[in-house]
Image (cartoon, helix red, strand yellow):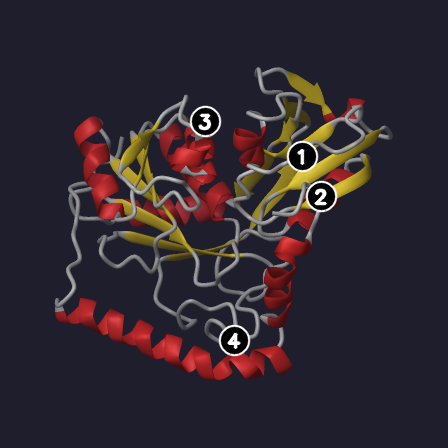
Amino acid sequence: MPPYGSSSHSAPASRLQRAWLHRGVLAWLLWPLSLVYAALFALRSWFYRLGWLKTERVQVPVIVVGNVIAGGAGKTPVVMAVVRHLQGRGLRVGVISRGYGRSTDDCREVLDESDPQDVGDEPALIRRATGAPVFVARRRVEAAQALLVRHPATQIIVSDDGLQHLALARDIELCVFDDRGVGNGWRLPAGPLREPWPRRCDLVLHSGERPAFDRGYTATRALAQEAITSDGNRVALSALAGKPAIALAAIARPEAFFDMLRARGLTLTETFGLPDHYDFADWQAPADAGHPLLCTEKDAVKLWRKAPGALAVPLHFTPAPEFFAALDAKLSSLDGYQAA
């Protein structure tokens, strides 16, 4: 494993993601494989429609927040925004997730003291940021059932990812896109699409700054005014402006985080873009440890165990009011749904 600061282990993924934006040579070379992927996906979907593969329903409404493209589109901030909105309406909300990148494979609850390596960095962040009960399992229906047993007063469940996880019945599907839109429009591995687009879904939300197409709702994104320390204290970003700092991000698009820090007046002497869900197992502190080390909230839940002095900079993600109005209208139309 290359040391901290090396980008060699993420280069192949970056090249592939760049290829997904255009129908260039690499995309054309992979196009025959995309036909095989599309055929297997269609066959699996057909099995579910015929009932040969079982879709299970739980006793409360389920909102699935997912995407049709690979490589991350900003689902986790959307999940947290939806959970907070529902909590603000007085609803008792639970969250389920596969827990991508975790070292375990069982069904378990994400607790405040849970090791992110055991539950996944995104579920740990959702639990920390919202206080909602969170369960992880490979089969999301198992996570939902366990959550309802442990927290029987739960009124609604939000699934972090899972549009293609057809084993769990859902009442509302929310599809998230970033500025890439559908990329080159081809299926994996020649393009970023996991399934065809357009497809039926209830709501479309664009998490980026420049929506790639007109359908759906938009949101604003901005860094918080303050960074958070591992012990819960806050440091104003304005106090760091103009001073040397180091930034790292293990997210789908690290440069977006770095650009937002620079826009706030921070002078980044070094930046380290690491693979999404990087576990920091072989992480090494940068040579100039005297400079503040800034990271995303998602990275902080793991990084703080090795670098308690790191500063986490939250991202404030705010969907347009029209989006929440549409979500509330969808919920109100569900049979048996009881608003708070």
The residue carrying mark 2 is 5
Give the label, 1 or 3, closer to the camera: 1
The image position of residue 284, as x and y in percent, is 67, 34
Task: Identify whether 307 is placed above or below 121.
Answer: above
Give the label, 2 or 3, closer to the camera: 2
The residue carrying mark 4 is 190
Cα–Cα span, label 2 and label 4: 29 Å
Task: Identify whether 136 is placed above or below 2.
Answer: above
Secondary structure under the numbered disc 1 in the rendered image: loop
Dot 1 crowding, Cα within 10 Å, few <14, some 14–19, many 20+: few
Residue nearest the viewer, comparing 153 with 103: 103
Q: Earlier in the sequence, mark 2 or mark 4?
A: 2
In the picture provided, is 193 more to the left or to the right than 305? left
Is residue 263 visible to the viewer in this orientation of the structure? no
In the picture provided, is 16 more to the left or to the right than 326? right
Residue nearest the viewer, comparing 323 with 22: 22
Dot 3 crowding, Cα within 10 Å, few <14, some 14–19, many 20+: some
Residue type highlighted by circle 4? Ala
The image position of residue 58, as x and y in percent, is 17, 44
Task: Identify whether 26 is placed above or below 277.
Answer: below
Secondary structure under the numbered disc 4 in the rendered image: loop
Cα–Cα span, label 3 and label 4: 37 Å
Tell me the number on the disc at residue 128: 3
Q: Are marks 1 and 2 in contact (CB under 8 Å)?
A: yes
Count the labels in the image.
4
Is residue 5 visible to the viewer in this orientation of the structure? yes
Cα–Cα span, label 4 and label 1: 35 Å
The residue carrying mark 1 is 284
Q: Earlier in the sequence, mark 2 or mark 3?
A: 2
Q: Are marks 3 and 4 in contact (CB under 8 Å)?
A: no
Q: Earlier in the sequence, mark 4 or mark 1?
A: 4
Residue placed furthest toward the left: 51
